[in-house]
Amino acid sequence: MESLLLTDGGRREFLRGLIRMDGYEIGVRVELPPTFPLCLAKVFIDSISPRVERRPHILTDGRLCIEAESDLLLDVHDPWGILRETLVRAHRLLHQILTGDRAAEFARELISYWKGSPRGLPVPCFVAPDDRPRLTKALYFEELLLAVADDPREPARFSPDFSRLPPCTLRNAIYIPIDPLAGDPAFHPDKLATLSELRKYVRALPSRDGRVLDKLLGRSGKHSPLVILGVRRPEGERALVGIQFHDTRGGHPLAHEGNGGSVEKIELQRRDAPFLASRGGADPHLRGRKVLLAGCGAVGGYLAMALARAGVGSLTLVDGDVFELANTYRHVCGIARNGMPKVFGLRQEIERLVPYITVSPYQQRLEAFLHERPQTLDSHDLVIAALGNPTIELELNRRIWSSHRNAPALFCWLEPLGLGGHALLTHGRASQSPARGCLECLYDHPVRGAALENLAAFAKPGEAYTRDSFGCGGRYLPFGDLDAQNTAQLTARLALRVLRGEVEGAPLQSWKGDARAFLQAGYEVTSRYESQTGAFAETLAYIRPDCAVCQT
Amino acid sequence: MANIQKYFEQFDEDIRLKRFDENQMLREKRDAIHRRLREKFEAMRRAGADIPSFETFNQGSYQMGTGIQPAEGGEYDIDVGLRFNCDQTKYSNPVALKQVVADALEGHTSIPTRMRRSCVTVYYKQNGEQAYHVDLAVYVYAHANSSRLVIAKGEHGSGLGDRKWEESSPQELCDWVENRFSNKEEEAQFLRVIRALKRWKTEKFKTDGQNAPSGIGLTVAAGQWFVPSIKRPFSGPIAFDDRTAMRAFVDRMVREFHLAGHKTDGSSLYRLEVRVPVVPHGDIFERMTSGQMSTFRDRLIQLRDQLDAVEHELDPVDACTRMLKEFGEAFPVPDKSKTGAVRGIATTTSGTSA
Ligand SMILES: [Zn+2]
């Protein structure tokens, strides 16, 4: 065991040894980090003899990039086993480095070799890579490159920081898709940063793309030209790196052999929607979908945020109310937007947190909104009502069913005191016409002349569950933030399945909560609550063959 | 409306009588009469009289499940059939056989036995007061080797035309009523509505009981026209709506009346005809006069209108008070305090939020 004096004065113990393999002699140092065995041992390559110039998977400090540790489960009771297997992994990787296709490895790891440019922070990139050369835009503040974007409005929409900047200069940049592995078995990322080598890769473009590129090169401005390379990786997708040419002589350095210039590597941070969505578990295909959300209260707030985070590209918010302090503990906006109309506050909160979404707020009651825009139910992919107002929701239900062209609708509502919540899909796609089953089916008079009851209810109907909040008109139904989240989640999951075309029929979904608080308050539950065994139920049994709305 | 179904059911619980099989008192009275007749006839036969053997069978409302407690001051009324093993040629005068039965039972209770047009009635006391009576209908076979029965009609002093053996199918009628609805909820509602209507007519014809439609008449009419009103929601218990079912049936009866002439004062007379569904297929209300019929119709119309008014009452207290006016004191009226705040029909609480 040797020890190493660290710059901060501490000492770290390590093992040093030699490995002979594939005709090489490799000096290896194995270090146990202080957190071992919660992590793998670190393996450093001190020397390789004979010398190997370009070695993928070995960092500048010599550390070997053994597999990403995040998806490993380590048995901490067997530290020796962990150490032994670390060495096996290191051995395997070294063999691959010394004998394998290094060019492919370099192409795979391109981004990590593009780091360390003197600029510091990577440049935000809103370019979605594809297979054809084309123009894109670069945003400069004076000579500082701020962003690259196919649509120059996107950076401002993406982050409020951009909208606060002074006006930027917009210049053309050229996007060039290249496939370095196709013609160069000795590819290395550094070659892309060498003008002469880069020209070779660009010249290797298919002739049609070459002609397109020649035109583009002629059109790029006088200023230091910027090129975005879409470098094809062995798996087929493209990594994006930037090249800024300086001190150009003649035209664009890539346009003609005689032109010259120096090359600066630009590290790009991808912010384009398909990349972020797929990396974040959102669905890039939902970006084209339009959802109308009526009701931006507790459930509606979480619902809007959930849909935004799932990748839905367009949300229309309808709610006439203003945020009050009473909303603080059960709204996704918390106290942040107190005093603002809910639709505007919620839009701000969504845009603060989620990019690539268009939120259209309408501060008015749904009835008025529908009256002014009768076509709106047709122009959305899905309508969701989280109003907590069955009267208006039943009216919406009837309107939805008044034309077969109208979108499917989802109704969601909460029970008092944590008893549960429900979501009902109606007017969804069925093989022929919209599937039978609607909100009207759920509301019936138990006896003729008696008041309407919601047949899905968990709380006995006819009871007043609202509480008084010291003032006129200030009655509210007691429920907690998690109840609202649960109902929003149930609804959002169903909504996403609807948007993906995965739901047949008109299911009623319910989640069942704990009745203790409800029963302690002296209330009674329905037999539906009692008979539901699991926490979650889905049923079509509620559909009434005599429903006046969906069976005509 | 306040949903008064539970009060309706409570009312029924209070007025209904159990069937023979479930009612020990009824069984005991029936069996005591049976023993008494058997012993008396045996003694008479030993003295040389020729009296055919007989069986008793259950008939009437207790058998059908439409029996109700008598209203305040009223009497229990038990129907028992006596079927003698002979044909009608043995007794050309049916009153003679009824007399044999009446004589045998004389002194069975402290109140004299009476012969009435369709039966022999034995009266019982309870706590020193006349409390109930057993109506014994006397049957013989229509012909030798036939299973069809004829009932003895007539009493002392009846004209010759009124003393007769009349075709009758008491057990078939019971079977018909019992089999109207095979679904047990529908049958339960059917019987509840009949029982309530029987109590209603007792109340409404309290002072002029002889003008009342018979219980069996209401039962047969219901058998023809009653339509259940029951909802089976996808969740929760079955929802009975007895008020709606009764309203529909009453309305149907009202509409089935036809104009039958005019009184001297020019007002219209109406009749309702309800065919008995078994032999002899007569009109079950044939013995009611057109005047009685018209009164019956008027009171049905009042009942229908009252049931409509009940539908529109918001407060169950007010709704039940209306029901009490039609069905008497047995119809429960909840305390104001128990029903809580009055809630609307068209404006109720939703219990939902978002
Ligand atoms: Zn429906």
Image (tube, coloured by chain):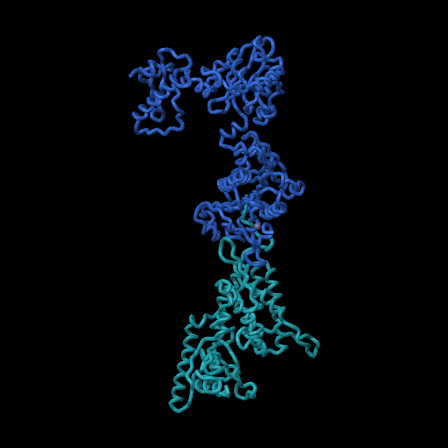
Q: Is residue B41 above or below residue A385?
A: below
Q: Looking at the picture, does residue A242 appear above or below residue B308?
A: above
Give the quarter of the figure containing the C terminus of chain B: top right
> Where is the N terminus of chain B found, in terms of image quarters?
bottom right
Q: Residue furthest right?
A: B266
> How far across and down, in percent of the image, does residue B337 sit?
53, 58
Q: Is residue A100 left or right of residue A400?
A: left
Identify the residue at horizontal 63%, vertical 16% (top origin). A219
> Taking the image as drawn, is residue A470 in sight?
no
Tell whether A236 sits left or right of A162.
left
Question: How many numbered markers are drawn?
Answer: 0
Q: Is the residue A476 above or below the residue B59 in the image?
A: above
Q: Position of residue A125 (x, y in %)?
A: 55, 22
What chain is the cyan one?
B
Q: Residue at x 51, y 57 (%)?
A: B232
Residue A366, quarter of the rendered image: top right
Based on the displayed image, in which of its 4 quarters is residue A424 positioned?
top right
Asked where in the image residue B262 lies, by quadrant, the reply is bottom right
User: Where B257 falls versus A317 (above or below)?
Assistant: below
Toward the front, the furthest residue is: A207
Q: Position of residue A442 (x, y in %)?
A: 55, 51
Identify the residue shown where x is 62% and y is 20%.
A166
Instruction: Name the one closer to the observer, B306 or A144.
Output: A144
Whether residue B35 is visible to the viewer of this picture, yes or no, is yes
Q: Give residue B204's position: percent from left, percent from top.
A: 58, 72
Q: Which chain is assigned blue? A: A
User: In front here: A404 or B60?
Assistant: A404
Residue shown at 61% from the left, 34% from the top: A360
